[in-house]
Image (cartoon, coloured by chain):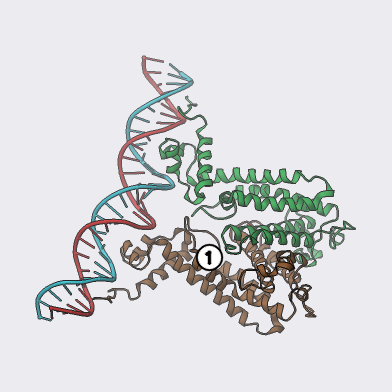
Chain colours: A brown, B green, C cyan, D red
Amino acid sequence: MVRPLKSRQIPNLQEAIKAVAWKQISETGAASLSLRSIARELNISAPAIYNYFADRDALVTSLMVDAFAVYGQYHNEVASGYPGPERLVERMFALARAFRDWALDFPQRYELLFGNPIPGYRFPEHEFHAALHQSNCALLQLIGELHSVGMLQVPDSMLAMLPPPDRMQDLPAGQNPVELLTDAVAVLIWSRLHGLVSLELAGMFAGRQGSAQALYEVELELIVRQFVNSNRMGGSDVQPSIR
Amino acid sequence: MVRPLKSRQIPNLQEAIKAVAWKQISETGAASLSLRSIARELNISAPAIYNYFADRDALVTSLMVDAFAVYGQYHNEVASGYPGPERLVERMFALARAFRDWALDFPQRYELLFGNPIPGYRFPEHEFHAALHQSNCALLQLIGELHSVGMLQVPDSMLAMLPPPDRMQDLPAGQNPVELLTDAVAVLIWSRLHGLVSLELAGMFAGRQGSAQALYEVELELIVRQFVNSNRMGGSDVQPSIR
DNA sequence: CATATGCAATTTACAGCGTAAATTTTAAAA
DNA sequence: TTTTAAAATTTACGCTGTAAATTGCATATG
Protein backbone atom coordinates (compact mmCIF):
# COMPACT_ATOMS: atom_id res chain seq x y z
CA MET A 1 0.00 0.00 0.00
CA VAL A 2 3.01 2.18 0.32
CA ARG A 3 5.22 2.77 -2.66
CA PRO A 4 7.49 5.71 -3.12
CA LEU A 5 10.33 6.53 -0.79
CA LYS A 6 13.20 8.77 -1.62
CA SER A 7 16.63 8.28 -0.21
CA ARG A 8 17.46 11.06 2.19
CA GLN A 9 20.89 12.10 1.05
CA ILE A 10 21.20 11.26 -2.59
CA PRO A 11 18.39 11.66 -5.05
CA ASN A 12 18.51 9.11 -7.85
CA LEU A 13 20.90 6.83 -6.08
CA GLN A 14 20.80 4.37 -8.97
CA GLU A 15 22.41 6.89 -11.29
CA ALA A 16 24.82 8.00 -8.58
CA ILE A 17 26.03 4.43 -8.18
CA LYS A 18 26.66 4.15 -11.89
CA ALA A 19 28.42 7.50 -11.96
CA VAL A 20 30.81 6.46 -9.20
CA ALA A 21 31.32 3.11 -10.94
CA TRP A 22 32.31 4.89 -14.14
CA LYS A 23 34.63 7.15 -12.24
CA GLN A 24 36.35 4.19 -10.66
CA ILE A 25 36.50 2.30 -13.95
CA SER A 26 38.15 5.28 -15.61
CA GLU A 27 40.64 5.63 -12.81
CA THR A 28 41.63 2.09 -11.93
CA GLY A 29 40.05 -0.12 -14.57
CA ALA A 30 36.96 -2.24 -14.72
CA ALA A 31 38.72 -5.15 -13.09
CA SER A 32 39.06 -3.37 -9.78
CA LEU A 33 35.45 -2.27 -9.69
CA SER A 34 34.06 -3.09 -6.28
CA LEU A 35 30.63 -2.63 -4.75
CA ARG A 36 32.18 -1.90 -1.40
CA SER A 37 34.39 0.85 -2.72
CA ILE A 38 31.46 2.40 -4.56
CA ALA A 39 29.46 2.30 -1.35
CA ARG A 40 32.35 3.79 0.58
CA GLU A 41 32.58 6.69 -1.85
CA LEU A 42 28.85 7.33 -1.52
CA ASN A 43 28.81 7.02 2.29
CA ILE A 44 26.50 4.10 1.91
CA SER A 45 26.60 0.54 3.14
CA ALA A 46 27.58 -1.99 0.51
CA PRO A 47 24.41 -4.10 0.63
CA ALA A 48 22.36 -0.97 -0.03
CA ILE A 49 23.42 -1.25 -3.65
CA TYR A 50 21.44 -4.47 -3.87
CA ASN A 51 18.28 -2.37 -3.75
CA TYR A 52 19.20 -0.99 -7.14
CA PHE A 53 21.08 -3.82 -8.80
CA ALA A 54 20.49 -7.52 -8.28
CA ASP A 55 24.21 -8.14 -7.96
CA ARG A 56 27.55 -6.95 -9.23
CA ASP A 57 26.97 -8.47 -12.65
CA ALA A 58 23.71 -6.59 -13.04
CA LEU A 59 25.52 -3.34 -12.34
CA VAL A 60 28.19 -4.21 -14.89
CA THR A 61 25.55 -5.10 -17.46
CA SER A 62 23.83 -1.78 -16.90
CA LEU A 63 27.12 0.04 -17.32
CA MET A 64 27.88 -1.85 -20.51
CA VAL A 65 24.46 -1.18 -22.00
CA ASP A 66 25.01 2.52 -21.41
CA ALA A 67 28.54 2.34 -22.78
CA PHE A 68 27.44 0.57 -25.94
CA ALA A 69 24.85 3.27 -26.48
CA VAL A 70 27.28 6.13 -25.90
CA TYR A 71 29.88 4.46 -28.08
CA GLY A 72 27.42 3.88 -30.90
CA GLN A 73 26.09 7.41 -30.63
CA TYR A 74 29.60 8.81 -30.82
CA HIS A 75 30.22 6.86 -34.00
CA ASN A 76 26.93 8.06 -35.41
CA GLU A 77 27.83 11.64 -34.65
CA VAL A 78 31.19 11.29 -36.32
CA ALA A 79 29.53 9.69 -39.33
CA SER A 80 26.96 12.46 -39.54
CA GLY A 81 29.80 14.90 -40.09
CA TYR A 82 30.32 13.36 -43.51
CA PRO A 83 26.86 13.02 -45.00
CA GLY A 84 25.84 12.02 -48.47
CA PRO A 85 27.36 9.69 -51.00
CA GLU A 86 30.12 12.10 -52.01
CA ARG A 87 32.06 11.78 -48.78
CA LEU A 88 31.82 8.07 -48.08
CA VAL A 89 35.56 7.49 -48.20
CA GLU A 90 36.16 10.47 -45.97
CA ARG A 91 33.56 9.09 -43.58
CA MET A 92 35.28 5.71 -43.57
CA PHE A 93 38.58 7.29 -42.54
CA ALA A 94 36.91 9.45 -39.95
CA LEU A 95 35.01 6.53 -38.43
CA ALA A 96 38.09 4.35 -38.27
CA ARG A 97 40.16 7.09 -36.68
CA ALA A 98 37.36 7.79 -34.24
CA PHE A 99 37.38 4.08 -33.40
CA ARG A 100 41.02 4.21 -32.33
CA ASP A 101 40.74 7.62 -30.71
CA TRP A 102 37.87 6.47 -28.52
CA ALA A 103 39.79 3.36 -27.50
CA LEU A 104 42.88 5.40 -26.59
CA ASP A 105 40.85 8.09 -24.80
CA PHE A 106 38.80 5.57 -22.82
CA PRO A 107 40.90 2.42 -22.73
CA GLN A 108 39.10 1.08 -19.68
CA ARG A 109 35.72 1.45 -21.38
CA TYR A 110 37.00 -0.13 -24.55
CA GLU A 111 38.30 -3.06 -22.53
CA LEU A 112 35.00 -3.29 -20.70
CA LEU A 113 33.05 -3.53 -23.95
CA PHE A 114 35.33 -5.64 -26.10
CA GLY A 115 37.76 -7.28 -23.71
CA ASN A 116 36.94 -9.46 -20.75
CA PRO A 117 38.31 -7.44 -17.87
CA ILE A 118 35.89 -8.68 -15.22
CA PRO A 119 36.54 -12.24 -14.08
CA GLY A 120 33.53 -14.48 -14.31
CA TYR A 121 31.32 -11.88 -15.93
CA ARG A 122 29.58 -12.42 -19.27
CA PHE A 123 27.20 -10.06 -20.97
CA PRO A 124 23.72 -11.63 -21.05
CA GLU A 125 22.94 -13.06 -24.46
CA HIS A 126 19.48 -11.62 -24.99
CA GLU A 127 20.68 -8.03 -24.62
CA PHE A 128 23.89 -8.74 -26.47
CA HIS A 129 22.64 -8.67 -30.03
CA ALA A 130 20.95 -5.29 -29.80
CA ALA A 131 23.83 -3.68 -27.96
CA LEU A 132 26.40 -4.97 -30.41
CA HIS A 133 24.37 -3.89 -33.41
CA GLN A 134 24.00 -0.44 -31.90
CA SER A 135 27.75 -0.17 -31.51
CA ASN A 136 28.48 -1.15 -35.10
CA CYS A 137 25.56 0.66 -36.62
CA ALA A 138 27.52 3.50 -38.22
CA LEU A 139 29.93 1.15 -39.94
CA LEU A 140 27.15 -1.11 -41.18
CA GLN A 141 25.31 1.92 -42.49
CA LEU A 142 28.43 3.11 -44.26
CA ILE A 143 29.05 -0.23 -45.94
CA GLY A 144 25.41 -0.34 -46.96
CA GLU A 145 25.67 3.12 -48.53
CA LEU A 146 28.89 2.18 -50.28
CA HIS A 147 27.11 -0.76 -51.76
CA SER A 148 24.05 1.19 -52.80
CA VAL A 149 26.13 3.69 -54.76
CA GLY A 150 28.15 0.91 -56.31
CA MET A 151 31.36 1.71 -54.53
CA LEU A 152 31.58 -1.48 -52.49
CA GLN A 153 34.13 -3.88 -53.81
CA VAL A 154 33.40 -7.34 -52.47
CA PRO A 155 36.38 -9.64 -53.01
CA ASP A 156 35.66 -12.73 -55.05
CA SER A 157 36.70 -15.03 -52.24
CA MET A 158 33.83 -13.76 -50.11
CA LEU A 159 31.30 -15.24 -52.49
CA ALA A 160 32.17 -18.61 -50.98
CA MET A 161 30.21 -17.47 -47.92
CA LEU A 162 26.96 -17.52 -49.87
CA PRO A 163 24.95 -20.72 -50.16
CA PRO A 164 25.01 -22.25 -53.65
CA PRO A 165 22.48 -20.64 -56.01
CA ASP A 166 20.16 -23.62 -55.98
CA ARG A 167 19.49 -23.30 -52.26
CA MET A 168 19.62 -19.58 -51.82
CA GLN A 169 16.36 -19.80 -49.89
CA ASP A 170 18.12 -21.53 -46.96
CA LEU A 171 19.35 -18.17 -45.75
CA PRO A 172 18.38 -17.15 -42.20
CA ALA A 173 15.08 -15.34 -41.98
CA GLY A 174 15.28 -11.71 -42.96
CA GLN A 175 18.71 -12.14 -44.52
CA ASN A 176 19.26 -11.56 -48.18
CA PRO A 177 22.54 -12.27 -49.92
CA VAL A 178 23.50 -8.61 -50.15
CA GLU A 179 23.00 -8.09 -46.43
CA LEU A 180 25.01 -11.19 -45.65
CA LEU A 181 27.94 -9.90 -47.68
CA THR A 182 27.80 -6.30 -46.47
CA ASP A 183 27.59 -7.58 -42.90
CA ALA A 184 30.61 -9.77 -43.50
CA VAL A 185 32.57 -6.87 -44.95
CA ALA A 186 31.70 -4.75 -41.95
CA VAL A 187 32.80 -7.46 -39.55
CA LEU A 188 36.07 -7.98 -41.40
CA ILE A 189 36.82 -4.27 -41.26
CA TRP A 190 35.79 -4.07 -37.62
CA SER A 191 38.03 -6.99 -36.71
CA ARG A 192 40.99 -5.39 -38.45
CA LEU A 193 40.53 -2.16 -36.53
CA HIS A 194 39.96 -4.05 -33.32
CA GLY A 195 42.99 -6.25 -33.90
CA LEU A 196 45.37 -3.32 -34.09
CA VAL A 197 43.72 -1.33 -31.33
CA SER A 198 43.47 -4.22 -28.90
CA LEU A 199 47.10 -5.19 -29.43
CA GLU A 200 48.09 -1.58 -28.93
CA LEU A 201 46.06 -1.33 -25.72
CA ALA A 202 47.56 -4.59 -24.50
CA GLY A 203 50.98 -2.99 -24.82
CA MET A 204 52.09 -5.34 -27.59
CA PHE A 205 53.58 -2.46 -29.56
CA ALA A 206 55.55 -1.16 -26.62
CA GLY A 207 59.10 -0.44 -27.66
CA ARG A 208 58.22 0.32 -31.26
CA GLN A 209 57.94 4.01 -30.52
CA GLY A 210 55.14 5.81 -32.24
CA SER A 211 54.66 3.11 -34.81
CA ALA A 212 51.18 2.19 -33.63
CA GLN A 213 49.59 5.19 -35.25
CA ALA A 214 51.62 4.78 -38.44
CA LEU A 215 50.62 1.13 -38.64
CA TYR A 216 47.00 2.09 -38.12
CA GLU A 217 47.10 4.62 -40.92
CA VAL A 218 48.66 2.06 -43.25
CA GLU A 219 45.99 -0.46 -42.35
CA LEU A 220 43.28 2.13 -42.99
CA GLU A 221 44.67 2.79 -46.41
CA LEU A 222 44.78 -0.93 -47.16
CA ILE A 223 41.23 -1.44 -45.94
CA VAL A 224 39.86 1.32 -48.11
CA ARG A 225 41.81 0.14 -51.15
CA GLN A 226 40.53 -3.36 -50.54
CA PHE A 227 36.84 -2.68 -50.19
CA VAL A 228 36.18 0.65 -51.86
CA ASN A 229 35.87 1.33 -55.55
CA SER A 230 36.91 4.97 -55.64
CA ASN A 231 36.14 5.46 -59.30
CA ARG A 232 32.52 4.82 -58.42
CA MET A 233 31.74 3.08 -61.64
CA GLY A 234 29.19 0.42 -62.31
CA GLY A 235 29.38 -1.19 -58.90
CA SER A 236 31.50 -3.87 -57.32
CA ASP A 237 32.53 -7.05 -59.02
CA VAL A 238 29.86 -9.00 -57.29
CA GLN A 239 26.55 -7.19 -57.01
CA PRO A 240 25.44 -7.82 -60.56
CA SER A 241 25.65 -11.54 -60.01
CA ILE A 242 23.74 -11.60 -56.73
CA ARG A 243 20.98 -9.13 -57.48
CA MET B 1 75.82 -23.92 6.17
CA VAL B 2 72.84 -26.01 5.36
CA ARG B 3 71.31 -25.65 1.94
CA PRO B 4 69.23 -28.30 0.30
CA LEU B 5 66.00 -29.60 1.68
CA LYS B 6 63.52 -31.62 -0.28
CA SER B 7 59.84 -31.39 0.36
CA ARG B 8 58.57 -34.60 1.90
CA GLN B 9 55.54 -35.38 -0.17
CA ILE B 10 56.05 -33.77 -3.51
CA PRO B 11 59.36 -33.71 -5.31
CA ASN B 12 59.79 -30.62 -7.47
CA LEU B 13 57.02 -28.69 -5.83
CA GLN B 14 57.72 -25.68 -8.04
CA GLU B 15 56.73 -27.61 -11.15
CA ALA B 16 53.81 -29.21 -9.33
CA ILE B 17 52.45 -25.76 -8.48
CA LYS B 18 52.66 -24.69 -12.10
CA ALA B 19 51.05 -27.92 -13.25
CA VAL B 20 48.09 -27.41 -10.95
CA ALA B 21 47.90 -23.77 -12.00
CA TRP B 22 47.69 -24.79 -15.65
CA LYS B 23 45.04 -27.35 -14.83
CA GLN B 24 42.94 -24.73 -13.07
CA ILE B 25 43.49 -22.19 -15.84
CA SER B 26 42.33 -24.71 -18.42
CA GLU B 27 39.28 -25.58 -16.37
CA THR B 28 38.06 -22.29 -15.02
CA GLY B 29 40.12 -19.60 -16.71
CA ALA B 30 43.12 -17.57 -15.71
CA ALA B 31 40.97 -15.03 -13.92
CA SER B 32 39.92 -17.49 -11.24
CA LEU B 33 43.46 -18.66 -10.58
CA SER B 34 44.02 -18.62 -6.85
CA LEU B 35 47.03 -19.46 -4.74
CA ARG B 36 44.77 -20.83 -2.04
CA SER B 37 42.99 -23.20 -4.39
CA ILE B 38 46.29 -24.41 -5.79
CA ALA B 39 47.52 -25.05 -2.28
CA ARG B 40 44.30 -26.85 -1.41
CA GLU B 41 44.71 -29.17 -4.38
CA LEU B 42 48.29 -29.95 -3.35
CA ASN B 43 47.45 -30.43 0.34
CA ILE B 44 49.71 -27.56 1.11
CA SER B 45 49.25 -24.34 3.01
CA ALA B 46 48.84 -21.29 0.84
CA PRO B 47 51.85 -19.32 2.10
CA ALA B 48 54.06 -22.31 1.28
CA ILE B 49 53.84 -21.24 -2.34
CA TYR B 50 55.78 -18.13 -1.43
CA ASN B 51 58.88 -20.28 -1.05
CA TYR B 52 58.76 -20.90 -4.80
CA PHE B 53 57.25 -17.72 -6.19
CA ALA B 54 57.63 -14.23 -4.79
CA ASP B 55 53.93 -13.57 -5.18
CA ARG B 56 50.98 -14.39 -7.38
CA ASP B 57 52.26 -12.20 -10.19
CA ALA B 58 55.58 -14.04 -10.24
CA LEU B 59 53.72 -17.31 -10.68
CA VAL B 60 51.67 -15.85 -13.51
CA THR B 61 54.80 -14.51 -15.19
CA SER B 62 56.43 -17.91 -14.98
CA LEU B 63 53.33 -19.51 -16.49
CA MET B 64 53.28 -16.96 -19.29
CA VAL B 65 56.95 -17.39 -20.11
CA ASP B 66 56.35 -21.12 -20.46
CA ALA B 67 53.21 -20.55 -22.49
CA PHE B 68 54.94 -18.17 -24.88
CA ALA B 69 57.65 -20.77 -25.41
CA VAL B 70 55.21 -23.63 -25.99
CA TYR B 71 53.11 -21.45 -28.28
CA GLY B 72 56.12 -20.34 -30.31
CA GLN B 73 57.44 -23.88 -30.53
CA TYR B 74 54.08 -25.12 -31.77
CA HIS B 75 54.14 -22.52 -34.52
CA ASN B 76 57.68 -23.47 -35.40
CA GLU B 77 56.71 -27.11 -35.63
CA VAL B 78 53.78 -26.31 -37.87
CA ALA B 79 56.03 -24.17 -40.04
CA SER B 80 58.67 -26.87 -40.26
CA GLY B 81 56.08 -29.07 -41.93
CA TYR B 82 56.27 -26.82 -44.98
CA PRO B 83 59.97 -26.24 -45.57
CA GLY B 84 61.68 -24.56 -48.43
CA PRO B 85 60.73 -21.69 -50.67
CA GLU B 86 58.32 -23.76 -52.77
CA ARG B 87 55.70 -24.09 -50.03
CA LEU B 88 55.69 -20.62 -48.52
CA VAL B 89 52.05 -19.95 -49.32
CA GLU B 90 51.06 -23.33 -47.97
CA ARG B 91 53.03 -22.53 -44.84
CA MET B 92 51.27 -19.21 -44.49
CA PHE B 93 47.86 -20.88 -44.57
CA ALA B 94 48.98 -23.60 -42.20
CA LEU B 95 50.42 -21.11 -39.71
CA ALA B 96 47.34 -18.95 -39.77
CA ARG B 97 45.03 -21.92 -39.30
CA ALA B 98 47.25 -23.19 -36.51
CA PHE B 99 46.94 -19.75 -34.92
CA ARG B 100 43.17 -20.01 -34.72
CA ASP B 101 43.16 -23.71 -33.84
CA TRP B 102 45.45 -23.11 -30.89
CA ALA B 103 43.29 -20.27 -29.68
CA LEU B 104 40.12 -22.36 -29.92
CA ASP B 105 41.77 -25.42 -28.35
CA PHE B 106 43.27 -23.43 -25.47
CA PRO B 107 41.15 -20.30 -25.19
CA GLN B 108 42.21 -19.70 -21.60
CA ARG B 109 45.89 -19.80 -22.55
CA TYR B 110 45.29 -17.53 -25.51
CA GLU B 111 43.52 -15.07 -23.25
CA LEU B 112 46.33 -15.32 -20.74
CA LEU B 113 48.94 -14.45 -23.36
CA PHE B 114 47.13 -11.86 -25.45
CA GLY B 115 44.21 -10.72 -23.34
CA ASN B 116 44.29 -9.22 -19.89
CA PRO B 117 42.38 -11.80 -17.88
CA ILE B 118 44.13 -11.22 -14.56
CA PRO B 119 43.17 -7.95 -12.86
CA GLY B 120 46.10 -5.79 -11.94
CA TYR B 121 48.67 -8.04 -13.55
CA ARG B 122 51.09 -6.86 -16.23
CA PHE B 123 53.85 -8.87 -17.83
CA PRO B 124 57.23 -7.39 -16.81
CA GLU B 125 58.70 -5.29 -19.56
CA HIS B 126 62.24 -6.66 -19.64
CA GLU B 127 61.05 -10.21 -20.33
CA PHE B 128 58.33 -9.05 -22.64
CA HIS B 129 60.31 -8.39 -25.77
CA ALA B 130 61.99 -11.79 -25.89
CA ALA B 131 58.79 -13.68 -25.12
CA LEU B 132 56.81 -11.81 -27.74
CA HIS B 133 59.46 -12.28 -30.38
CA GLN B 134 59.57 -15.98 -29.60
CA SER B 135 55.84 -16.24 -30.10
CA ASN B 136 55.88 -14.49 -33.47
CA CYS B 137 59.12 -16.01 -34.67
CA ALA B 138 57.60 -18.38 -37.22
CA LEU B 139 55.57 -15.66 -38.88
CA LEU B 140 58.51 -13.26 -38.96
CA GLN B 141 60.66 -15.98 -40.45
CA LEU B 142 58.03 -16.69 -43.07
CA ILE B 143 57.73 -13.06 -44.09
CA GLY B 144 61.49 -12.83 -44.26
CA GLU B 145 61.68 -15.84 -46.55
CA LEU B 146 58.89 -14.49 -48.72
CA HIS B 147 60.91 -11.33 -49.11
CA SER B 148 64.16 -13.08 -49.86
CA VAL B 149 62.62 -15.08 -52.70
CA GLY B 150 60.93 -11.96 -54.01
CA MET B 151 57.40 -13.04 -53.20
CA LEU B 152 56.66 -10.37 -50.63
CA GLN B 153 54.39 -7.68 -51.94
CA VAL B 154 54.74 -4.60 -49.76
CA PRO B 155 51.88 -2.18 -50.43
CA ASP B 156 52.96 1.25 -51.58
CA SER B 157 51.27 2.92 -48.63
CA MET B 158 53.64 1.17 -46.24
CA LEU B 159 56.59 3.07 -47.63
CA ALA B 160 55.32 6.05 -45.67
CA MET B 161 56.60 4.26 -42.58
CA LEU B 162 60.20 4.65 -43.71
CA PRO B 163 62.16 7.78 -42.89
CA PRO B 164 62.83 10.01 -45.89
CA PRO B 165 65.85 8.85 -47.92
CA ASP B 166 68.05 11.72 -46.76
CA ARG B 167 67.89 10.60 -43.13
CA MET B 168 67.72 6.87 -43.53
CA GLN B 169 70.49 6.59 -40.95
CA ASP B 170 68.10 7.71 -38.18
CA LEU B 171 66.69 4.18 -37.98
CA PRO B 172 66.88 2.43 -34.60
CA ALA B 173 70.07 0.53 -34.03
CA GLY B 174 70.21 -2.80 -35.82
CA GLN B 175 67.20 -1.99 -37.95
CA ASN B 176 67.50 -1.76 -41.66
CA PRO B 177 64.65 -0.60 -43.88
CA VAL B 178 63.87 -4.10 -45.10
CA GLU B 179 63.54 -5.41 -41.56
CA LEU B 180 61.34 -2.50 -40.63
CA LEU B 181 58.97 -3.25 -43.47
CA THR B 182 58.92 -7.03 -43.04
CA ASP B 183 58.31 -6.56 -39.32
CA ALA B 184 55.45 -4.21 -40.10
CA VAL B 185 53.92 -6.68 -42.53
CA ALA B 186 54.16 -9.43 -39.94
CA VAL B 187 52.49 -7.25 -37.31
CA LEU B 188 49.71 -6.27 -39.69
CA ILE B 189 49.03 -9.90 -40.50
CA TRP B 190 49.23 -10.91 -36.86
CA SER B 191 46.79 -8.21 -35.85
CA ARG B 192 44.31 -9.32 -38.50
CA LEU B 193 44.42 -12.91 -37.27
CA HIS B 194 44.23 -11.75 -33.69
CA GLY B 195 41.35 -9.40 -34.44
CA LEU B 196 39.13 -12.17 -35.75
CA VAL B 197 40.19 -14.74 -33.19
CA SER B 198 39.83 -12.45 -30.20
CA LEU B 199 36.37 -11.30 -31.29
CA GLU B 200 35.39 -14.91 -31.81
CA LEU B 201 36.67 -15.89 -28.36
CA ALA B 202 34.86 -12.93 -26.84
CA GLY B 203 31.65 -14.33 -28.23
CA MET B 204 31.11 -11.43 -30.61
CA PHE B 205 30.15 -13.78 -33.43
CA ALA B 206 27.62 -15.64 -31.34
CA GLY B 207 24.40 -16.02 -33.28
CA ARG B 208 26.06 -16.05 -36.66
CA GLN B 209 26.31 -19.82 -36.61
CA GLY B 210 29.44 -21.28 -38.10
CA SER B 211 30.39 -18.10 -39.85
CA ALA B 212 33.51 -17.52 -37.77
CA GLN B 213 35.48 -20.14 -39.60
CA ALA B 214 34.18 -19.01 -42.98
CA LEU B 215 35.12 -15.42 -42.18
CA TYR B 216 38.55 -16.54 -41.09
CA GLU B 217 39.13 -18.42 -44.33
CA VAL B 218 38.05 -15.39 -46.34
CA GLU B 219 40.40 -13.18 -44.38
CA LEU B 220 43.26 -15.64 -44.94
CA GLU B 221 42.66 -15.53 -48.65
CA LEU B 222 42.62 -11.73 -48.57
CA ILE B 223 45.81 -11.57 -46.54
CA VAL B 224 47.69 -13.84 -48.90
CA ARG B 225 46.43 -11.99 -51.95
CA GLN B 226 47.47 -8.74 -50.36
CA PHE B 227 51.01 -9.56 -49.36
CA VAL B 228 52.10 -12.47 -51.51
CA ASN B 229 53.23 -12.37 -55.10
CA SER B 230 52.28 -15.88 -56.18
CA ASN B 231 53.87 -15.61 -59.59
CA ARG B 232 57.19 -15.23 -57.81
CA MET B 233 58.59 -12.91 -60.40
CA GLY B 234 61.16 -10.23 -59.96
CA GLY B 235 60.24 -9.32 -56.41
CA SER B 236 57.84 -6.97 -54.78
CA ASP B 237 57.10 -3.47 -55.91
CA VAL B 238 59.28 -2.01 -53.24
CA GLN B 239 62.45 -3.93 -52.52
CA PRO B 240 64.40 -2.66 -55.51
CA SER B 241 64.04 0.86 -54.27
CA ILE B 242 65.17 0.19 -50.72
CA ARG B 243 68.08 -2.17 -51.33
C1' DC C 1 -4.28 11.56 14.53
C1' DA C 2 -2.59 7.06 15.27
C1' DT C 3 -1.45 2.97 13.33
C1' DA C 4 -0.09 -0.44 10.08
C1' DT C 5 2.49 -1.30 5.93
C1' DG C 6 6.44 -2.06 3.29
C1' DC C 7 10.48 -0.15 1.11
C1' DA C 8 15.22 1.45 2.07
C1' DA C 9 18.90 1.26 4.71
C1' DT C 10 21.81 -0.69 8.22
C1' DT C 11 24.42 -4.19 10.85
C1' DT C 12 26.13 -8.66 11.14
C1' DA C 13 28.05 -12.61 9.26
C1' DC C 14 30.28 -16.02 6.08
C1' DA C 15 33.38 -17.65 2.69
C1' DG C 16 36.66 -16.45 -0.46
C1' DC C 17 41.05 -13.95 -1.76
C1' DG C 18 46.48 -12.34 -1.40
C1' DT C 19 49.97 -12.05 1.72
C1' DA C 20 52.73 -10.39 5.95
C1' DA C 21 54.55 -12.12 10.39
C1' DA C 22 55.69 -15.33 13.67
C1' DT C 23 56.36 -20.00 14.60
C1' DT C 24 57.29 -24.81 14.16
C1' DT C 25 59.24 -28.72 11.74
C1' DT C 26 62.97 -30.97 9.50
C1' DA C 27 67.06 -32.33 7.16
C1' DA C 28 71.69 -31.71 6.61
C1' DA C 29 76.34 -29.75 8.26
C1' DA C 30 79.56 -29.13 12.00
C1' DT D 1 74.75 -34.43 19.09
C1' DT D 2 74.30 -29.91 18.39
C1' DT D 3 73.76 -26.15 15.23
C1' DT D 4 71.74 -23.93 11.44
C1' DA D 5 68.95 -22.62 7.84
C1' DA D 6 65.42 -23.86 4.71
C1' DA D 7 60.58 -25.29 4.30
C1' DA D 8 56.40 -25.58 6.10
C1' DT D 9 52.59 -24.25 9.19
C1' DT D 10 49.53 -21.28 11.90
C1' DT D 11 47.71 -16.93 12.69
C1' DA D 12 46.16 -12.63 11.32
C1' DC D 13 44.77 -8.44 8.52
C1' DG D 14 42.30 -6.24 5.05
C1' DC D 15 39.98 -6.84 0.94
C1' DT D 16 36.08 -8.86 -1.90
C1' DG D 17 30.71 -10.27 -2.97
C1' DT D 18 26.58 -11.19 -0.84
C1' DA D 19 23.02 -13.62 2.27
C1' DA D 20 20.20 -12.77 6.49
C1' DA D 21 18.25 -10.30 10.04
C1' DT D 22 17.22 -5.90 11.78
C1' DT D 23 16.15 -1.04 12.11
C1' DG D 24 14.37 3.46 10.38
C1' DC D 25 11.05 6.02 8.04
C1' DA D 26 7.59 7.83 4.78
C1' DT D 27 3.24 6.99 3.31
C1' DA D 28 -1.86 5.13 3.15
C1' DT D 29 -5.35 3.68 5.79
C1' DG D 30 -8.60 3.05 10.07
Vertical order, A94 against B228 (above or below): below
Asked if residue A42 lies left or right of residue B161, the reply is: left
**Amino acid bearing label 1:** Leu
Q: Name the one closer to the observer, B4 or B14.
A: B14
What residue is shown at x 55% (from left), y 65% (from top)?
A: A110
B187 or B213: nearer the viewer: B213
Q: Secondary structure at mark 1?
A: helix
Q: Quadrant of residue A195?
A: bottom right
- The quadrant of the image that shows the C terminus of chain A is bottom right
In the image, residue A133 lies at what x, y percent? 57, 71
Query: Who's the residue at 71% across and 80% down the image?
Result: A148
Please tell me how crowded label 1 is: few (under 14), some (14-19), or many (20+) other residues with Cα within 10 Å: some
Task: Give x and y (percent) for residue A24.
Answer: 44, 64
> In which quarter of the view is residue A230 placed?
bottom right
Image quadrant containing the N terminus of chain A:
bottom left
**Residue A184: horizontal and vertical position, in percent?**
67, 68
| Residue picked out by circle 1 | A113
Residue located at (48% from left, 72% from top): A66
Measured as percent of width and height from the top left, residue A23 is found at 44, 68
